[in-house]
Structure formats: structure tokens, C-alpha cells
Image: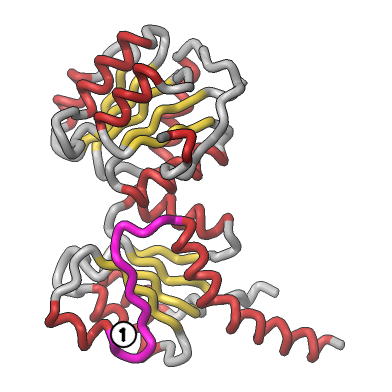
């Protein structure tokens, strides 16, 4: 009904960012893309979109990494989900990884797997919203 | 007859989404994760290719330029697009000739799709249209 929440997708490699966004959209997982941490935070602060999930690489250019973006996202969207992707898991990162209900996946991740993960994570909330609107409309 | 692209990139996720998007654009796309696999696919694979789309920098001893040489020897009517993040625009222009085009990273998706369409318009499409599309690199057809 035009109120479908979006995924906030943060990836600094433009080709990957654009192509993944396209594939997600094809799988009924619309997303808004950001190229780095500050960009992602700006999009959240603008408030133009309702986000249900953050999909973010842990390693990002600049001083704001994926964990910091996730902290910001969780503050702004307490019911939102966080899916982080990382190629390097350092022991000192463990507290950040196990924080709240964050999901962490190693790189490289297959696109098919990613779509399944996002569907499994996003659908329950989305179905609840559809059920509520169906009840309301009858 | 669908144009057939040999796609070589060691970045698994990028390779996969490029394959998905090119397939959606109507192209058959055969993915390879490295130069050695690409060489094998050119030499003895079950496909006929119209376009090589390859990253230049590749793990192992075979880089994109070597793959391009082998591809052109086997498919003189085919076209080549190489993608590099390690050369400047001047070098890219000097390396681009006839049926070879070098694109620089960072690259936008639209730029890539436009280049693929242009390259395939230039190529004499030789694939027979019977190629199957194993977008999954683990597909047994690619073993």
C-alpha cells in the first residue's frame, strides 16, 4: 500500500551496490543505498524512508564502520533488524557482533543465500503488517 | 539467439549479481572465478562466447589481459571488456582498441550495461542459442 518498509543497504563499491540493489528489488526487497557510514546516517536522519532492516558491510571507508552504523540504526529503529557482512572477524569485535539480535555473515556470501536471509528476516514483520491491514480492511 | 558472455571476476558476490543482472537483460552469462578456470572454459568448455567481461586483476598467474588474448585467439569476431581499478584513464584509452574496451573502477552499473550492449552490437554473435545458463558457479555443468 505504498508503506512497505525499506532495507538500508550500505556498500562502498558502487557497481556491487547498484547491482545488489537491483537484485534485491527484483526479489521484492526494496532498498535505499548508501555508499558509506555518514551517508547512511544522513539518510536515517532525513527520515524520508521507513526502514525495517540494515544490511551493511562491517568494513567501510572513513571513520564510521558498520558497527557504528548499526548502533545508529538500532537507536533510530528499535524494532529494525541488522544484518552485517564481514570478511574479517577480529576477537575484539565479538561484543559488537553479539549485541542485540544482530546477524553476522562472513564474506563472500552467495546472493541466493543473502536473499533468503533477508526474506526470512524481513517477511515475519511484513506479514504481520499485511495481516493487520487485511483485518482492518474487511 | 542470445548473446553469450564469459564473465570472470574473483569477487563472488559481484560475479553473481553481475550474472543475475546480465541474465535479466537477456544475455547468457557463464561465470568463472579466476583466470585458470576462464582459460579452461575458453579452450574446452561447452559454450561459444560473444563477449569476454573480465576483471584485470585476478588471483593466480593469469590476469585479465592474458584471458583476453586467449579469448581473441579463439573468438576473433568476439569482443572484450576489461575492468580495472589499477590503471588511469589515459592507459585505459590506449589499451582500448578495435574489439577491446577497458573500463575503470569505480564503475556504475549503467555504464557497464551500456558497454556490454555496445560490445555485443559490435560482436558477430556466434553462440547457437542452446547454451544453458548456470548462474550458480557450483553448477555441475561448470565442473
Q: Is residue A16 left or right of residue A79?
A: left
Q: Is residue B40 magenta?
A: no
Residue at 18% over, 30% down: B89
Residue B111 location, x and y as percent? 39, 37
Residue closer to the observer: B75 or A5? B75
Q: Is residue A90 left or right of residue A13?
A: left
Q: Is residue B138 left or right of residue A4?
A: left
Q: Quadrant of the N terminus of chain A?
A: bottom right
Residue B87 location, x and y as percent? 14, 33
Residue closer to the observer: A62 or A135? A135
Residue closer to the observer: B127 or A33? B127
> Which quadrant of the structure image shows residue B105?
top left
Image mark 1: chain: A
Is residue B103 visible in the rendered structure shown here?
no
Is residue B114 shown above or below A59? above
Q: Quadrant of the C terminus of chain A?
A: bottom right
Q: Main secondary structure of the magenta part?
A: loop
Q: In this figure, what is the number of numbered marks? A: 1
> Which quadrant of the structure image shows residue A56?
bottom left
Q: Which residue is mark 1?
A: A72
Residue at 32% over, 51% down: A14
Q: Is residue A108 magenta?
A: yes
Is residue A37 visible in the rendered structure shown here?
yes
Is residue B97 shown above or below B115? above
Residue A88 location, x and y as percent? 18, 66
Residue at 60% over, 82% down: A124
Stretch in magenta: A98-111
Residue B38 location, x and y as percent? 32, 28
Report crowding for label 1: few under 14, some 14 to 19, many 20 or more residues within 10 A (C-alpha): some
> Which quadrant of the structure image shows residue B31?
top left
Is residue A18 shown above or below B108? below
Amino acid at each position: 500500500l505504498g508503506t512497505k518498509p525499506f532495507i538500508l543497504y550500505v556498500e562502498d563499491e558502487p557497481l556491487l551496490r547498484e547491482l545488489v540493489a537491483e537484485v534485491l528489488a527484483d526479489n521484492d526487497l526494496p532498498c535505499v543505498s548508501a555508499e558509506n557510514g555518514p551517508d547512511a546516517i544522513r539518510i536515517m536522519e532525513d527520515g524520508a524512508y521507513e526502514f525495517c532492516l540494515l544490511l551493511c558491510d562491517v568494513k567501510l571507508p572513513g571513520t564510521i564502520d558498520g558497527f557504528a552504523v548499526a548502533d545508529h540504526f538500532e537507536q533510530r529503529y528499535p524494532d529494525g533488524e541488522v544484518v552485517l557482512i564481514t570478511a574479517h572477524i577480529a576477537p575484539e569485535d565479538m561484543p559488537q557482533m553479539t549485541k542485540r539480535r544482530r546477524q553476522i555473515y562472513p564474506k563472500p556470501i552467495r546472493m541466493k543465500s543473502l536473499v533468503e536471509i533477508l526474506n526470512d528476516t524481513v517477511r515475519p514483520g511484513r506479514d504481520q503488517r499485511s495481516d493487520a491491514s487485511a483485518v482492518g480492511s474487511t | 539467439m542470445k548473446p553469450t558472455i564469459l564473465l570472470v571476476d574473483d569477487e563472488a558476490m559481484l560475479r553473481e549479481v553481475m550474472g543475475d543482472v546480465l541474465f535479466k537483460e537477456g544475455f547468457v552469462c557463464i561465470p568463472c572465478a579466476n583466470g585458470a578456470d576462464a582459460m579452461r572454459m575458453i579452450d574446452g568448455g561447452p559454450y561459444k562466447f560473444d563477449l569476454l567481461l573480465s576483471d584485470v586483476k585476478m588471483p593466480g598467474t593469469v590476469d585479465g589481459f592474458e584471458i583476453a588474448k586467449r579469448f581473441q585467439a579463439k573468438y576473433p569476431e568476439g569482443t572484450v571488456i576489461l575492468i580495472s581499478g589499477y590503471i588511469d584513464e589515459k592507459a585505459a584509452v590506449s589499451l582500448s582498441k578495435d574489439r577491446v574496451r577497458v573500463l575503470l573502477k569505480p564503475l556504475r552499473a549503467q555504464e557497464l550495461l551500456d558497454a556490454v550492449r555496445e560490445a555485443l552490437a559490435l560482436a558477430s554473435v556466434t553462440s547457437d542459442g542452446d547454451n544453458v545458463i548456470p548462474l550458480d558457479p557450483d553448477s555441475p555443468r561448470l565442473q
